Image (tube, grey):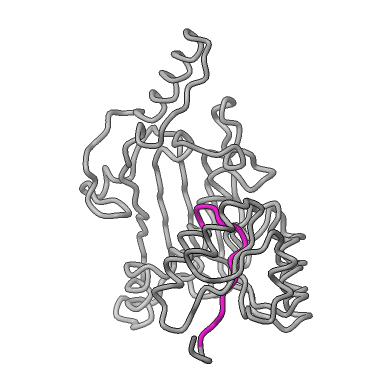
Amino acid sequence: MKSSQIRVGIAGLGIAGTEFIANVEKHPNMTVSAAATRDPKRREQFEKDFNANAYETIEAMCASDSIDLIYIATPTELHKEHVFIAAENKKHIIVEKPIATSIEEASSMIEICQKNNVHMLVGHSHSFELPIIEMKKIIDSGQIGDVRMINNLYYNDWIYRPRTPEELDTSLGGGVTFRQGSHQFDIIRFLGGGNVRSVRASTGRWDLKRNTEGSHSVWLEFENGVTATAIYNGYDHFHTTELTFGLGEGGPVKSNQPYGNSRKQIENTLSLRMKSNKKIVVAINQFPPNGIIQLIILFSV
């Protein structure tokens, strides 16, 4: 290991944690040095794969002198506790979005990092994507004038895709506003070029069988005078790709699905379950990928 490398410890070896490991391995100035998980099989596999220590607790991992930075990929309701542990052990922090489920928790996390003189970065990844970076370059160049309005529309089937229980529980950071709005608002803030002065919003819970926020309408005003709207609807009534010639977030959409396809998948599964009175496991590949895209319209003068 080079002395200039940042030594990373991974808190949580679920989907987010394991995906992050692959990116760390590609980075010339970072190395995976440790992980923490309660699952003994995952600890054993991690140690074999990376020749690094795997701990049962985050406390034990953060006490190690061989780690510079902790990536917190644990459930949202544990973020505050784990940030405090990392900060008090003088570790820099990357914490998954959303940072927390309340302003009070988020503020306390910022304060503990400031107190211990460590950096904390929240994992809003979309504002680092190349199309968004290019938008920012165009704005900063001044070639289209000053941005005055930003409008962001996002319609898809998020609420009806396969979800873990916490993704459908607002108190645990579930629903589109916590899960997807954090990306949406981060992009708008990045392009808006300043701090937000005021926020007005309304959220929708329109399917009590999946009782969390499935939509929101937000109006933001920046200190520099820019205004923005953020619309998100995950109820599978319309897909934004219909406005973008079939181009989605990951490129061209493979197929145009029938209206409400994901909702019908859920309804059909529930119907079969009731008829057979047996537990049915819905495989992820039963839900083919949908085209989704961030449609951002910039108005300038």
For the point 22% across and 39% down, which residue is it?
255
Q: In which quarter of the image is the C terminus?
A: bottom left
For the point 62% across and 51% down, which residue is it?
39
Q: Nearer the viewer, residue 55 or 95?
A: 55
Residue, far bottom: 3
- The magenta span reads 5-16
For the point 38% across and 81% down, which residue is it?
140
Q: Position of residue 138 (x, y in %)?
A: 32, 77
Snapshot quadrant of residue 205: top right
State yes or no: residue 27 in magenta: no
Q: Which of 129 and 164 is in front in this view?
A: 164
Up-down relation of residue 137 to residue 61 (above or below): below
Snapshot quadrant of residue 169: top right
Snapshot quadrant of residue 182: bottom right
For the point 29% across and 80% down, which residue is it?
143
Residue, far top: 275
Specify whether residue 196 is in view: no
Left or right position of 134 against 184: left
Up-down relation of residue 195 to residue 259 (above or below): below
Left or right position of 127 against 199: left
Specify whether residue 65 is in view: yes
Q: Which of 102 and 172 is in front in this view?
A: 172
Q: Position of residue 209 (x, y in %)?
A: 57, 25
Q: Please tell me how many numbered marks the rendered image carries.
A: 0
Q: Where is residue 137 in the image (x, y as percent from the top left)?
A: 35, 78
State yes or no: residue 9 in magenta: yes
Q: Which of 232 and 116 is in front in this view?
A: 116
Up-down relation of residue 44 to residue 217 (above or below): below
Q: Position of residue 210 (x, y in %)?
A: 56, 30
